[in-house]
Amino acid sequence: MSFTDWTAASGSIFKVKFVGLYQFENIYAQTKLMGASGSEGMAFANTFKYAFAVTIFLNIFGLLLALVFNLPFKFKGFIRSAFFIPCIFSALIICFTFSAIFYPGGPFDRFLTAVGMSDFIRPWLTDRSINIYVISAINIWMFLGFTATIYLAGLKSIPGELKEATRIDGANAWQNFRHITLPLIAPAVTISMVLSLVGSLKVFDLPYLLSGNQAYVINSLVYFQMGNQLYAYGTAISLVLFIIVCLLAFPLLKVLRKNEVQL
């Protein structure tokens, strides 16, 4: 369908015409012509910013949280559950909650005012220069417990006697983590990195529900083009997104698998 002129005006699906790469040329032309200020350019730029921020910081914080969860302390099970709960809730509930928190004059703005930081108050969800980063932070908070659980499963698979042997040999905590823990949890790193990259590239719900058309991502563009009954153009954008996901996910998967080791 992305190689046709399919629109609502085409009538029957059998009346569409083959137009080759016209839709893809149109995507390129619109992105190049409008740049970052146009909807196409903004959608691609925001998607890459979002994917980079979520993939990197979600995995860093998730690993750090898993290391904390792996320590012996009281109420460990309760705290793990508390961090895991957000990813169970519907994205709609999460978005309504944070829309209320970041609403102008809402709890977050009042908190900044109370601590003497009123100069930093911004329209968090409507300012196009920062809203994609705010939404990225909400995504990281939402799936932090899930990511930590993946890393915790990897940490639990490391034999305790192996760590004890390294301590006897005089390795400090950093050396233990660098040469024992990190290589042995490499499969968990692979799973978490690929899942977070693919999920963040094809995101739609959080940007749309939190900011509408103020934080365009690629799937937002698909949604609005389909809503405008430009079916072929929307399908072409969706196919471009599929190609982007493949071009980024498969090389990442290959690179990360090279670092995996087995006991």
Image: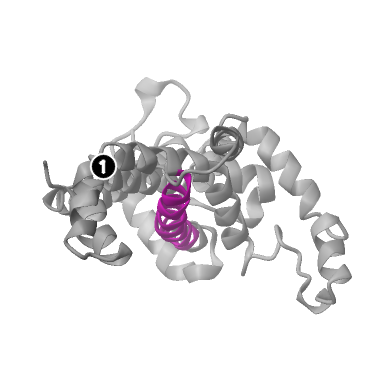
Residue 113 rendering spot, x and y as whole percentages: 87, 70
> What is the magenta range?
45-69
60 in magenta = yes
122 in magenta = no
Q: Is residue 11 left or right of residue 106?
A: left
Report helix, strand or loop for mark 1. Answer: helix
Type of amino acid at the residue the image marks with label 1: Gly
Q: Is residue 96 or residue 70 the one in the foreground?
A: 70
Quarter containing the N terminus:
top left
Q: Is residue 85 left or right of residue 54?
A: right
Residue 216 vs 159, above or below: the answer is below
Q: Is residue 117 left or right of residue 191?
A: right
Residue 3 rendering spot, x and y as whole percentages: 29, 39
Q: Is residue 189 or residue 263 the one in the foreground?
A: 263
Few, some or many residues within 10 Å of mark 1 (<14, 14–19, 20+): few
The residue under the point 54% across, 45% down is 220
The residue under the point 59% across, 37% down is 75
Residue 143 vs 217, above or below: the answer is above
Q: Which residue is mark 1?
A: 160
Residue 169 vs 258, above or below: the answer is below
Q: Is residue 175 or residue 40 the one in the foreground?
A: 175
- Asked whether residue 75 is in view, the answer is yes
Colouring: one colour
The residue under the point 45% across, 53% down is 58
Residue 183 rendering spot, x and y as whole percentages: 20, 53
Q: Main secondary structure of the magenta part?
A: helix
Quarter containing the C terminus:
top left
- Asked whether residue 3 is in view, the answer is no
Residue 96 rendering spot, x and y as whole percentages: 74, 40
Q: Is residue 257 or residue 76 the one in the foreground?
A: 76
